[in-house]
Amino acid sequence: MFESGQLTNRLAVYRAQKGYSQQDVAKKVGVSRQTIISIEKNRYNPSLKLAFELARLFDVGVEDIFLYQ
Amino acid sequence: MFESGQLTNRLAVYRAQKGYSQQDVAKKVGVSRQTIISIEKNRYNPSLKLAFELARLFDVGVEDIFLYQ
DNA sequence: ACGATATGTAAAAAATAGTTTACTTTGTGT
DNA sequence: ACACAAAGTAAACTATTTTTTACATATCGT
């Protein structure tokens, strides 16, 4: 994959709004806590499925959580 | 990852609308032709970055191309 | 009939996502 | 000061995506 656009996200913000811990979110979307931390720290590029799960959890669109410039 | 929701896509449709070959799309978004074929055949769950690249190519939202039920 | 282009399959290798475990740090409440 | 929960780091492991290569089939123009 190229190093074109930058992927960032507002996961921490949405998470705080709902008062969820990273652990809570991890459990709700079915991944480990490490995965949530890594996404919040922009360590990698999650799968589209996981992006959809997170969007569904917060009742928003994928593009509300994840930004690509 | 769980086997919750099903991920499908309309990539072939958007591609045909623009008259692009799989090869064209692959080149434009910077992946191999196999990757495009595999996505169209729902063989897997692409990365979010790639989903964004495809959406950008067709000037639509990620959720216009990819459906998650 | 021939060459060129588009689509498909398959399988091994490389790259990256996601898990697990264990330890550290930071904040908050008592 | 202490205990506890939340957040962070790191490393080794597993699972999955993506690449590469090679070959098959179908279609289209000449």
Image (tube, coloured by chain):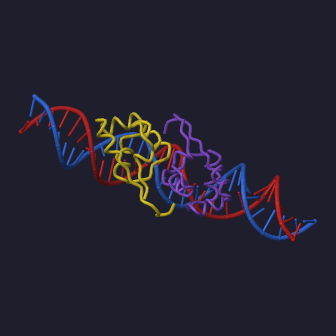
Chain colours: A yellow, B purple, C blue, D red
Give x and y (percent) for residue C8. 72, 50
Residue for point 62% across, 44% down: B42
Q: Position of residue B32 (x, y in %)?
A: 61, 60
- Note whether A40 is above or below C14 in the view shown: above
Residue C18 spot, x, y in % from top left? 44, 44
Question: Total label count?
Answer: 0
Left or right: A21 with respect to B62?
Answer: left
- Residue in the image at 48% along x and 54% along y: B49
Q: Position of residue A31 (x, y in %)?
A: 42, 39
Q: Give whichever of A27, A5 is nearer the camera.
A: A5
**What residue do we see at 58% from left, 46% from top?**
B44
Dividing the image into 4 quarters, which one contains the C terminus of chain B?
A: top right
Is B51 left or right of A20, judged from the image as shown? right
Question: Front-most of A68 and A31?
Answer: A68
Compared across the picture, whether B48 is left or right of A32 comes to right
**Quadrant position of residue A23:** top left
Q: Nearer the viewer, residue B64 or C3?
A: B64
- Looking at the picture, does residue C19 appear above or below residue A42? above
